[in-house]
Image (cartoon, rainbow, N blue to C red):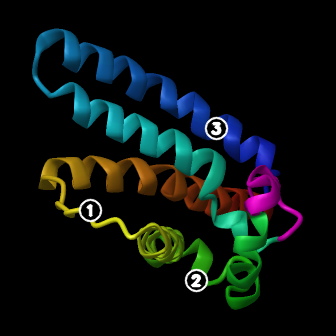
Amino acid sequence: MPSGKVHLRIEMIIFVPFLALGAYLLQTGLVYTLYVAVFLGGYFFSSFFLSPDLDLVRSDPFQRWGIARVLWIPYAHLFHHRALSHHIIFGPLTRICYLGGIASLAFVGILRLTGQHVPLSIPQWPVILALLLGLYLPNQIHTVVDALWSCLRHR
């Protein structure tokens, strides 16, 4: 399989046309700035921090979390490398739900400790869609690169 650095390089090369497309769409007024920012931010975050290789405790994405990487140890034990974590649909979904669950628990815990009450609102569907596309795309690229690499090596 390609190294984590190769995966990241490919994802960042593919990021450049999305960045250019985002600039074009903003310049022409075809989309809201928020949608482009959420998509590009999600893509960038996913490339660096939500890689399918989070199931390996010695991977670059795992190490990028710094001290917070301890949060991903249970994930790495739950998911075996190149199994569900590398599934085109369910792989990113497991990481998004896992991180979302941890963030939700932390948020609720902080609210309870501080006695704060924050009214919650759900973002508009285009924002959610832009975020999901941004989070999913680098994972799809990673999985496709792994599959192509395997095919080419076994020829």
Is residue 119 placed above or below 19 in the rendered structure? below
Q: Which label is found at residue 10? A: 3
Label 2 packing within 10 angstroms: few (<14), some (14-19), many (20+): some
Name which residue lies at 21% across and 64% down: 120
Residue denoted by label 2: 84
Q: Earlier in the sequence, mark 2 or mark 1?
A: 2
Residue 56 falls in image quadrant: bottom right
| Of residues 92 and 67, the one drawn nearer to the viewer in this rendering | 67
Q: Which label is found at residue 85? A: none
| Of residues 35 and 88, the one drawn nearer to the viewer in this rendering | 35
Label total for image: 3
| Residue at mark 3 to residue at mark 2: CA–CA distance | 22 Å
In the visual, does 133 lie left or right of 55? left
Name which residue lies at 13% across and 52% down: 124
In the visual, does 52 lie left or right of 42? right
The answer, for residue 155, to whether it is visible in the render is no
Label 1 packing within 10 angstroms: few (<14), some (14-19), many (20+): few
Residues at badges 3 and 1 in contact (C-beta under 8 Å)?
no
Name which residue lies at 39% across and 70% down: 115
The answer, for residue 13, to whether it is visible in the render is yes
Residues at badges 3 and 2 in contact (C-beta under 8 Å)?
no
Residue 36 falls in image quadrant: top left
Tag 3 secondary structure: helix
> Which stretch appears magenta?
57-68
Identity, as a three-letter code, of the amino acid under mark 2: Leu
